[in-house]
Amino acid sequence: MHFRIYRFNPETDREPYMQEYTIDDLDPSLMLRDALLHIKAQDETLSFRHSCGEGVCGSDGMNINGRNGLACVTSLSSLSEPIEIRPMPGLPVVRDLVVDMSQFFHHYRAVKPYLIVHDPVPEVEFRQTPEERDKLDGLYECILCGCCTTSCPSFWWNPDRFRGPAALLQAYRFLADSRDQATEQRLNELDGPYRLFRCHTIMSCVDVCPKGLNPTRAIHNIKKLMVKNSI
Ligand code: SF4
Ligand code: SF4
Ligand code: FES
């Protein structure tokens, strides 16, 4: 199988370049991460992140034949050759396929991704009805891989000001939670022209999410809550 992989080591390379690799006898039912491990066995200088191998940890997001995805759940048989692999776009490259996720996690932290409760904390547990709990489905499953945010043109143009689909999905995950008591604070934080409203419903985020989540719908629901709260 034939691969073209983005290479850049800021300590030794003046500019990025694409390196060709050919690996014989690869079983097409393997995942792309397996192929990258084969390549790394031949060329240990190739850098990429990975951990769980099961689509759970979110660490091996990369741009695969022009589309963001997780290498560990992308079957080789689904890819046309040469298989071109680049780092996720829109974030600074640390080395090869490894990007600096600081900006991504800055936005994640900024939406305060945890319950905020002003009432005294109950002695045993916070109670929710099954219907209230159901509202969190499609929101809590995010693995923070960054595939959505780094495929969003609005994020490429305003990476420091637009929160991006992953952080906004998390913002809505807590706005939708019946136990949270910071609705007004959360909505105020997202008000203004950039943090939320830079989303132009291009929907690249929905297209690439490996968990099948829908950040666009979450963003739309936050906008609806803002309108409701302003009346
Ligand atoms: S729908 Fe919004 S958040 Fe998603 S890719 Fe488009 S602009 Fe970005
Ligand atoms: S919403 Fe999907 S694509 Fe975006 S960070 Fe979460 S799991 Fe990854
Ligand atoms: S290695 Fe953990 S999600 Fe792919």
Image (cartoon, grey):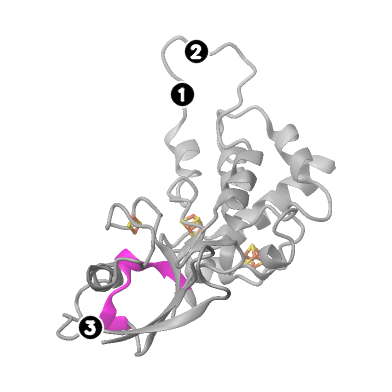
Q: Position of residue 58 (x, y in %)?
A: 40, 54
Q: Position of residue 27 (x, y in %)?
A: 16, 80
What residue lies at 53% left-to-right and 13% top-to-bottom? Answer: 121
Choose mark 2 or mark 1, whichever is in front: 2
Looking at the rendered image, the quarter that the N terminus falls into is: bottom left
Which sits in the foreground, 180 or 109?
109
Q: Amino acid at mark 2?
A: Pro
Q: Quadrant of residue 109?
A: top right
Which sits in the foreground, 180 or 149?
149
Whichever of callouts 2 and 3 sits on the residue coming sooner in the sequence is 3
Q: Position of residue 34 (x, y in %)?
A: 24, 69
Q: Which mark is residue 127?
A: 1
Disc 2/disc 3 C-alpha distance (Å): 58 Å
What residue lies at 72% left-to-right and 51% top-to-bottom? Answer: 224
Q: Quadrant of residue 197?
A: bottom right
Residue marked by disc 3: 23
What residue lies at 22% left-to-right and 68% top-to-bottom? Answer: 41
Is disc 1 surrounded by few (<14), some (14 to 19) or many (20+) residues within 10 Å? few
* Magenta residue span: 68-78
Disc 1/disc 3 C-alpha distance (Å): 54 Å
What residue lies at 46% left-to-right and 68% top-to-bottom? Answer: 96
Look at the numbered discs 2 and 3 and tell me whether their residues touch, using CB distance below 8 Å.
Answer: no
Q: Which of the four quarters of the rendered structure image does ligand 1 lie in?
A: bottom right
Q: Which mark is residue 95?
A: none
Circle 3 sits in a helix, a strand or a loop, which is it? loop
Look at the numbered discs 2 and 1 and tell me whether their residues touch, using CB distance below 8 Å.
Answer: yes
Look at the numbered discs 1 and 3 and tell me whether their residues touch, using CB distance below 8 Å.
Answer: no
Residue marked by disc 2: 122
